[in-house]
Image (cartoon, coloured by chain):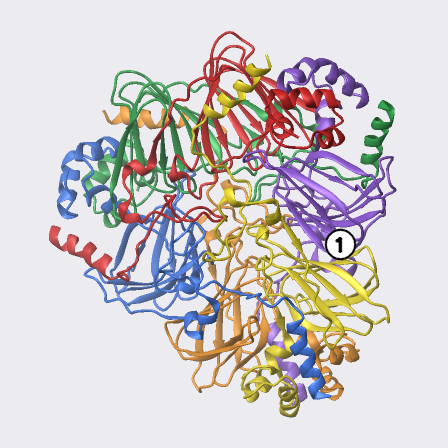
Chain colours: A blue, B green, C orange, D purple, E yellow, F red
């Protein structure tokens, strides 16, 4: 009886067309050419359990006392085609993540130990939505909106972050305005900032123009 | 023979199930509840040719010498489910559209009579991409990036604009920073702008805090 | 000068068509009718910062020593249209989450304090992919595949979980086979389990038939 | 031991948030308002096995000797959100399905007993792709292209048809040109057909204008 | 006059930009690298009518008296980007297709000659939805749910099957549990099956561990 | 202070994983292989402002007094993945764009100087929707429906056109029926046109068969 059953399944498989190589995932082949839908798939036969696992490389804190570790597609090819990616932030007491936006991703903060104050500005009517988040809080920052995160306390705070893009881009306001060769007169003209202010921050952020 | 053919088609239709009300479009019923995929469809039997036509309501130029007319879903329900919308901009000589971003839409400018200078800042590496556009030029501004448009000349310039959203939102930098109750100290802290600069522009844009 | 600038912006806004109510998010109105694309949007004018925040309700550990708290769309309407949801699992030492599948969601485990062993079975060729995960490890379990999680240690382990669905469903193998009125003979016939085994587990899981 | 296991699962379920009503399907509530993404879902608690089953209502053959039975969303609400629908065609010997296009659906014919000749015209370069199909043949007709099906034999032919739309629309060439009030002079002008030809077929298809 | 018209169209085409190679389909080039959105397109100029046609290769019945022929993308490259595929099943009297799930595809059975009994188990509340299908019945099995098909009669039954994936994967329960090196103790621990039962079926399905 | 701030940002960037090459756009590499989701992306480091700009190549008017210039993906690689493209039409007085359909794109006409009469035929019930459009009018022609455009006046009319496809295909009715080797008897049989009419137009459009 046992062997009958075994042969049953063997022949079940044989009775289907033979060259079907079903895949239920598409691990990115990062050496292939990226398309709007993602990278080519690594050949399924070469996929192992390690393709599904990633360990954050702990980033060292910067002068401003925070670090950010990423699990984007470039580090973790299993995210190919899934449409999101993950980060881990550690903010020492007093840390400030300055105003920035992710042009192509909604961000979700999952608060861990410690607490932070996060805020974003709506485009509908320029409302400022600010919230202090402690462990177990989730905060959604809609795609493309300017936002910031601050650790007002003295204790370190840690959080996981989800982005709805496999490789979220970041537009940091100060770098966009002052950290490049954006013509200073044009900056003033399109932002109404005083020329002196522009000049000063161009100096800080090593911009020219 | 003729009648045979006619009956043929009559019966062709009859031979299909009778209560199929095929629709090949979904005009928004703006009184219905909006969903992430758009508005409910107006009943197909009530749709007329006028549902497919829209005429721009000419906006009057503002003090800064430009006007912007929109064909967004709220004005033009035929855009329901199509994923884009249209605008028409007229910039008098010297007009400036200040730095802003569309968090949920790529913008495409189709230059008409006259010329403008448009620019955006990439998030990848803060490059400033600026171009002077004359009639027949098309310019793509990727979703969510800060950009501006200026008419440096003396002649009026006109252009059509396409957005990849049925109702693009706008985050105007100055209004986001200074036109609301965003706490001034927090603005300085997250932008590195001098408190005096923040105070001054809060005054200009009628912000508080 | 200042007032000129202010009027500029006021008129900028006035110069656009007046009844545009741009929204850049769609908070679910859970009282509305769900569609394949999600719930209707809560009116934007009634949205506050609290709509973007959720705090996990800590679940009490079950007999098997684990608890699972969810931030699915039913608890957190801000997820509407975003295509994913979040959970938090706490596994006491020895806890076992039995074999199950999420028919409509890829699952991503973000390992926190402690460690767990997780595994899934591929459908391609029935490979068993098992991995022990410690803090900072991420593990991707492709959509629809049978998987389990075990805490083999003595220490509690905690992790965040992401699902690529706003409300992931769960097919728990034992409940699917034994916790309902699935005819026992049919279970045996379609699984090759011995009738005695089926009868025994029907008893355990309160099934009938 | 057995009871322990049972309680385990009961508490497993209880340990999750209580008001999650996971659904893994969305049966259309046809009385609700259709959106670009489909109909609202029937409440999951009212769904039974019969919602997943449909039986073709056999259509009677028309004068031209074919019948077409449909399983579109209007007849079969389980197709809601799935993006395709099904038909069954029976063509008696000599039957002709005249030139038509499905503006929103690719069509796939799965040949059953008998044989038919099907053809479509590419838009790339106006190639005519014609093929005689017998049982077990599959034929793909790309979305929106003019095509026809003929049973040149004497035997009845039967086939299943898949459309990549829950409710494919049909533009039948003769009805579009001659079966309505399309101004005859305009028809001639935009098709280069002789006015006499237009007049004649307007008569056949009961058009006016 | 005739020649005027002809030149009209020739120049119509010439008046458009010359290197547009419009394609309205994307036949898979199976030698290219697969991406999450499908395979690269075969060059349109090399496409012929045969690319749109497929004939099922009749599979021989297995010991268990059923055969399954597939038209998946690997056999039929015209399905590229269409999001579904097709199969043909023939079940001799008494045939059983054991419990399995398609992690990435909804399955639709279109009953042909003969009859079968098909069933699936919901994940919402573990309901068992079973139905006997005869010719002309359609049955929808939602994505990822465990299901089975049995021919209880003596007559052969035939059916077409649609899957909402170009290459549906299959997770056959017995092979997932017993046909691999899944550690036997772990199987027992995560399924509550008795160790003897696991051992017995490991023998049947040639598993190890 | 200034330098502190600068180092802050330098280290901010350094503290993220180093090989992230975020891109917020995907300019087509037209030499790469097209997929259902578009072309591979040009390497971001080689992208310049000119990749985002296109200038229409003015097409010369044809005998029928209209010209059509295109900004499809083949001319303007920045459209990759955006799902639409643009055209510019110029119709001299009396110009006629004959009946045709775009199988894969909704078309939107944005009327410029002059006026045109445009019309399409619905598939629902063969209604003829005709409208005269002047400057500032927008007209939506749903995907796949037969339509025409005529300049009934004496003045030139100009308009921009949007298509919801990066490379819309065109099925021109006369070329589909008469400009190829479509067997004449088959044309008559599937359109009910008189054989003489078919023969005559086959002559005009240089068809054979």
In this rendering, the answer to whether A197 lies above or below F177 is below
- Mark 1 nearby-residue class (10 Å; few <14, some 14–19, many ≥20): some
Residue F15 placement (x, y as % from top left): 24, 62
**In the picture provided, is A91 more to the left or to the right than C152?**
left
Viewer-nearest residue: D70 or C10: D70
In this rendering, the answer to whether C203 lies above or below F73 is below
Residue drawn at x 48%, y 56% as measured from the top left: E36
Residue E58 placement (x, y as % from top left): 71, 64
Can you identify the residue that label 1 sits on?
D135
Residue A40 placement (x, y as % from top left): 43, 58
Q: Is residue B124 visible?
A: no
Q: Residue furthest bottom?
A: E196
Viewer-nearest residue: B184 or F132: F132
Q: Is residue C11 visible?
A: yes
Please state, as top left, top right, bottom left or bottom right, where the C terminus of chain D lies in the image.
top right
- Chain letter of the residue carrying label 1: D
Viewer-nearest residue: E183 or B168: E183
Q: Secondary structure at mark 1?
A: loop
**In the picture provided, is C115 more to the left or to the right than D128?**
left
Residue drawn at x 59%, y 24% as measured from the top left: F206
């Amino acid at each position: 009886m046992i062997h009958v059953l075994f042969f049953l399944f063997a022949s079940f498989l044989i009775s289907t067309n033979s060259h079907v190589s079903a895949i239920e995932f598409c691990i990115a082949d990062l050496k292939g050419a990226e398309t709007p839908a993602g990278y080519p798939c690594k050949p399924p036969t070469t996929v192992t359990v390690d393709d599904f696992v990633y360990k954050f490389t702990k980033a060292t804190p910067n002068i401003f006392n925070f670090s950010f570790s990423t699990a984007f597609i470039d580090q973790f090819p299993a995210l190919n085609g899934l449409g999101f990616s993950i980060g881990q932030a550690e903010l020492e007491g007093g840390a400030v993540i300055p105003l920035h936006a992710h042009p192509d991703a909604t961000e979700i903060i999952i608060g861990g130990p410690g607490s932070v104050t996060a805020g974003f500005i709506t485009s509908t009517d320029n409302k400022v939505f600010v919230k202090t988040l402690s462990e177990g809080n989730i905060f959604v920052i809609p795609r493309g909106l300017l936002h910031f995160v601050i650790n007002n306390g003295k204790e370190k705070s840690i959080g996981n972050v989800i982005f709805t893009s496999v490789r979220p881009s970041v537009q940091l306001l100060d770098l966009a305005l002052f950290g490049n060769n954006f013509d200073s007169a044009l900056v003033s003209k399109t932002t109404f900032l005083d020329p002196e202010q522009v000049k000063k921050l161009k100096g800080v952020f090593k911009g020219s123009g």
